[in-house]
Image: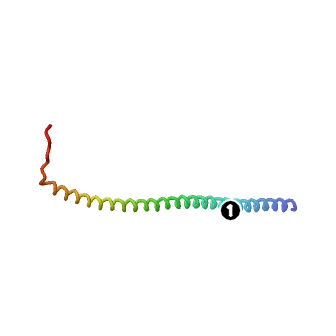
Amino acid sequence: MDTQFVDMAHVLTTAIAGVVGWLAGRKKQKNDFLSELQSSIDLLSEKNRKLMEEVVLSREENAKIRGEVIKLREENKVLRFEIEALNKKLENIKTITKKV
């Protein structure tokens, strides 16, 4: 009986060690996976931060350009008015040309 008991204890010990080893390995695998996920999240967060900075800069540039376009349109309107006024003054003036 002692031999059977020793064999049974050995089988149980091996089985328990296998289960404990599998559980420890599974936990490490999950931790490694979570670590990789966190690294991916960090990388994506950094890329997102850079893209947001680019978007903010682009919006600032667009606002500046819009302001310049509005200013140029106003200047254009004034210049058109001046050209119309000058053209009205020139309507009744005859051109003098020399014949050579």
| Occupied quadrant, residue 81 | bottom left
Q: In the rendered view, does 2 fall on the left or right side of 88? A: right
The location of residue 73, given as percent across then percent down, is 30, 60
Q: In the rendered view, does 8 fall on the left or right side of 46? A: right
Q: In the rendered view, does 28 fall on the left or right side of 97? A: right
**Of the pair 16 and 30, the residue shown nearer to us:** 30
**Of the pair 82 and 25, the residue shown nearer to us:** 82
Question: Which residue is pictured at 66% across the width and 62% down the height?
Answer: 31
Question: Which residue is pictured at 26% across the width and 61% down the height?
Answer: 78
> How is the rendered protein coloured?
rainbow
The location of residue 86, given as percent across then percent down, is 19, 56
Label 1 neighbourhood size at 10 Å, few (<14), some (14-19), many (20+)?
few
The location of residue 42, given as percent across then percent down, is 59, 61
Residue type of the residue flagged with mark 1: Lys
Secondary element under disc 1, as helix, strand or loop, is helix
Q: How many marks are shown on the rendered structure?
A: 1
Q: Quadrant of the C terminus?
A: top left
Q: Quadrant of the N terminus?
A: bottom right
Q: Which residue reaches farthest top?
A: 100
The location of residue 97, given as percent across then percent down, is 14, 43
**Of the pair 44 and 34, the residue shown nearer to us:** 44
Instruction: From the image, tell me which residue sits under label 1.
Output: 27
Q: Which residue reaches farthest right?
A: 2
| Occupied quadrant, residue 65 | bottom left
